[in-house]
Amino acid sequence: MKHYEILDAKTREKLCFLDKVEPHATIAEIKNLFTKTHPQWYPARQSLRLDPKGKSLKDEDVLQKLPVGTTATLYFRDLGAQISWVTVFLTEYAGPLFIYLLFYFRVPFIYGHKYDFTSSRHTVVHLACICHSFHYIKRLLETLFVHRFSHGTMPLRNIFKNCTYYWGFAAWMAYYINHPLYTPPTYGAQQVKLALAIFVICQLGNFSIHMALRDLRPAGSKTRKIPYPTKNPFTWLFLLVSCPNYTYEVGSWIGFAIMTQCLPVALFSLVGFTQMTIWAKGKHRSYLKEFRDYPPLRMPIIPFLL
Amino acid sequence: MAAVAATAAAKGNGGGGGRAGAGDASGTRKKKGPGPLATAYLVIYNVVMTAGWLVIAVGLVRAYLAKGSYHSLYYSIEKPLKFFQTGALLEILHCAIGIVPSSVVLTSFQVMSRVFLIWAVTHSVKESEDSVLLFVIAWTITEIIRYSFYTFSLLNHLPYLIKWARYTLFIVLYPMGVSGELLTIYAALPFVRQAGLYSISLPNKYNFSFDYYAFLILIMISYIPIFPQLYFHMIHQRRKILSHTEEHKKFE
């Protein structure tokens, strides 16, 4: 039986003393006990560590295995209000889906009054609406049924940041594509067909990768394994990159940019590419750190290059 | 804001590469400092910049004494102003290669906002040049103090007067610079609208449009949230750094 005291990491104030805790107990259980005395700090908001400036302990960590004496000191940091990943994803993806349609149907007060509820005479504009809507519907469905999240929550301020980004860009792109003065692609139907093919292939690829990643991890677990190509040809990109889902995502948006020949779409693709490259490099680094036998040929996001 | 930002981010309290990013608590970072070659280069850079802004200051005074009025003083220092303010872009590089311990993002923001005002407003809209004097004076005084601060810090010989000046004069110079900048942008507006400067409208084959007039208005609005934050950050820094030095002096 051990005793645990929880101190504030910044002020060193004694916040809580837990005596007679079972040695097999996990950090998650300590967090639940801590919430009882401080209900405003629900478990998702708590960061407990052995050193005030150290790394957070994981919920699954067993107390017995921690390097402490008879009375252990845990330091607490408030992570701030938290929101679930699922909530954030659903909100940030539902926005663009809905917003784009407002522009597509030329709802009043966006374009001149004579254009209210009119329809574009360009086929590519209708096609673009289908592609954009499909993309976000796919994302929403994947969030609900496919993804297995490592973390339950993220800081609340992220939802404002993320929604501004997604919703803002969606409105900006949709405004031009659905504008009465929209100019269709220079190379006409050929350009549109090629770009559509790129888009569809990359969407299928992206979905294949999401499914492959899901199958790596059993439901409810947080295990991490090296992803490998499966029978699905789209997953063969794993031979060359660590995060083919991001590769396919960039490809989809490049396809969409070529299809609509719209500069704001190209800029959105560029910004997205930059962010995904940062994530891919991070993921690649963690794979290398965690697995000695990680395939050396793989690059983070672009085969052989990046 | 360009005036405010430039002093706000650089809160170094002596020693090392000189400029510390806003938000970094000086106590928690490892003071590594640039190597001897980098230090030599930075000293030269900061000396040259100090000299450059002194040239601008002297130029202003001489032109005023010669002409007897404030009109067209800008033209007398237009070239060195453009040269030395644009030269400050190097500071982004310094942060990027790590010889100055500042945030690349913050430094880019500061320098780009200055460069934007010089080239995209003052240079591009000749008619805005009358309002320019207010921020030019504010920037000149600020930069002379700032660059000499860095020079002395790098040589580990910072006179208290320079430190005091850096953390005190901003109280007047910030609002002065910000007012000058806003007045200049405001003066440029009607001419931008008239000429359709830097603007592109539909239809075009890239399906893109940009209204520089609206953009300038957005820039002016952005001063409202940004300026107070930077200003009060400097006030906070002032309290921390100047009182810290006072205490040290008491114990000597």
Image: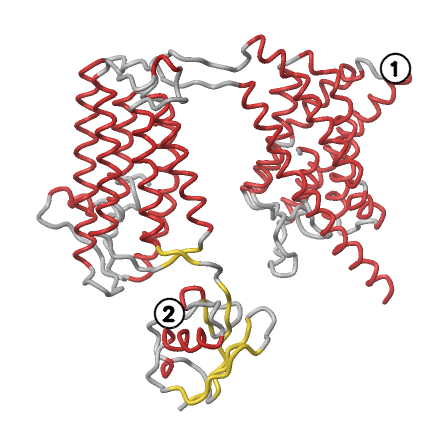
Judge the density around disc 2: few (<14), some (14-19), many (≥20) Cα neighbours within 10 Å. few
Q: Chain of mark 2?
A: A
On the same chain, marks 1 and 2? The answer is no
Q: Nearer the viewer, residue B97 or B240?
A: B240
Left or right side of A148 for A33: right
The vertical placement of B80 against A167, above or below, is above
On the image, numbered disc 2 is attached to which residue? A58
Image mark for residue B69: 1
Distance Cα–Cα, label 1 vs label 2: 70 Å
Q: Nearer the viewer, residue B135 or A15?
A: A15
Quadrant location of the C terminus of chain A in the rendered image: top left
The residue at the point 86 percent across, 61 percent down is B249
Work out which residue is located at the far top of the displayed protein and give it. Answer: B195
Image quadrant assignment for residue B184: top right
Kind of residue at disc 1:
Ser
Kind of residue at disc 2:
Lys
Disc tally is 2
Q: Chain of mark 1?
A: B
Q: Secondary structure at mark 1?
A: loop
- Residue B177 position, x and y percent, is 74, 31
Left or right side of B28 for A244: left
Q: Secondary structure at mark 2?
A: loop
* Badge 1 vs badge 2, beta-carbon distance below 8 Å: no
Image quadrant assignment for residue A167: top left
Q: Nearer the viewer, residue B152 or A102?
A: A102
- Residue B50 position, x and y percent, is 76, 34
Image quadrant assignment for residue B218: top right
- Residue B149 position, x and y percent, is 76, 44
The residue at the point 45 percent across, 88 percent down is A19
Image mark for residue A215: none
The residue at the point 91 percent across, 14 percent down is B68
